[in-house]
Amino acid sequence: MMLALRLKAPSLLTRFQVPIQVVLYALLFMVADRLVGALHLPLPANIVGMLMMLLLIAFRVLPLSWVKAGSRWLLAEMLLFFVPAVVAVVNYAQLLMVEGWKIFLVIGISTILTLGATAVVVDKVYKLELRMAERKNAQALQKAEHD
């Protein structure tokens, strides 16, 4: 009997893992929203919530494994969150016919700038990691020669 219960427990835990993590994200957003309101921060609550999540993970208060499945699910279902935006665009077809080129120009420029900034950051971090690895190898080599 205990063996049967032990075999059932992981699937039950796995089944509720994603909903619990999504609720954790929602609670973190609500805390961030209250914090933004109370402190009159010039940042949106979602940015403050992401920074709080980053700090919780960085300081190992919240293990990464506790938020991984929920974040993967949300990323996989991200398209569903854009459906209301597409419906709104359909409702403003006349506006798009008149001012649409400006909107698409802004979207195109911001996409190019975002991709460029991401490429620069990735390149700088990659070079930093290479320098750190070279420094670590040099220290190990010096230590080996010294011993």
Image: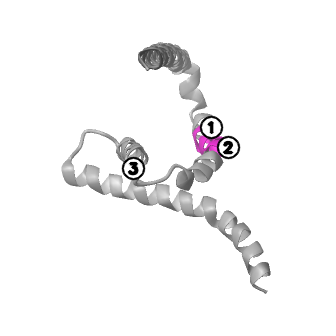
The disc placed on residue 14 is none
Q: Nearer the viewer, residue 40 or 115?
A: 115
Q: Quadrant of residue 46?
A: top left
Q: How many marks?
A: 3
Specify the color scheme: one colour
Element class at badge 3: helix
Q: Is residue 126 left or right of residue 39?
A: right
> Which corner quadrant holds the N terminus?
bottom right
Instruction: Please give the residue where the numbered disc 1 appears in the rendered image.
Output: 86
Estimate the x, y position of residue 34 in percent, counting from the top left.
Answer: 29, 57
Mark 1: few, some, or many residues within 10 Å (few <14, many ≥20)? few
Instruction: Please give the residue where the numbered disc 3 appears in the rendered image.
Output: 56
Q: Is residue 49 left or right of residue 3?
A: left
What's under tag 1, amino acid-wise? Answer: Val
Estimate the x, y position of residue 57 in percent, counting from the top left.
Answer: 43, 47
Picture residue at 23% right of the left edge, 43% below the top:
41
Tell which circle, 1 or 2, labels the residue nearer the N-terminal end: 2
- The vertical placement of 84 against 62, above or below, is above
Estimate the x, y position of residue 122 in percent, counting from the top left.
Answer: 50, 18
What's under tag 3, amino acid-wise? Answer: Leu
Q: CA distance from mark 2 to mark 3?
A: 23 Å
Which one is closest to the eye, mark 2 or mark 3? 3
Q: Is residue 33 left or right of residue 94?
A: left
In the image, residue 94 lies in the stretch drawn in magenta: no
Mark 3: few, some, or many residues within 10 Å (few <14, many ≥20)? some
Picture residue at 77% right of the left edge, 73% below the top:
7
Q: CA distance from mark 3 to mark 1?
A: 34 Å
Instruction: Please give the residue where the numbered disc 2 appears in the rendered image.
Output: 76
Stretch in magenta: 75-87
Estimate the x, y position of residue 94 in percent, counting from the top left.
Answer: 57, 28
- The vertical placement of 33 against 131, above or below, is below
Mark 2: few, some, or many residues within 10 Å (few <14, many ≥20)? few
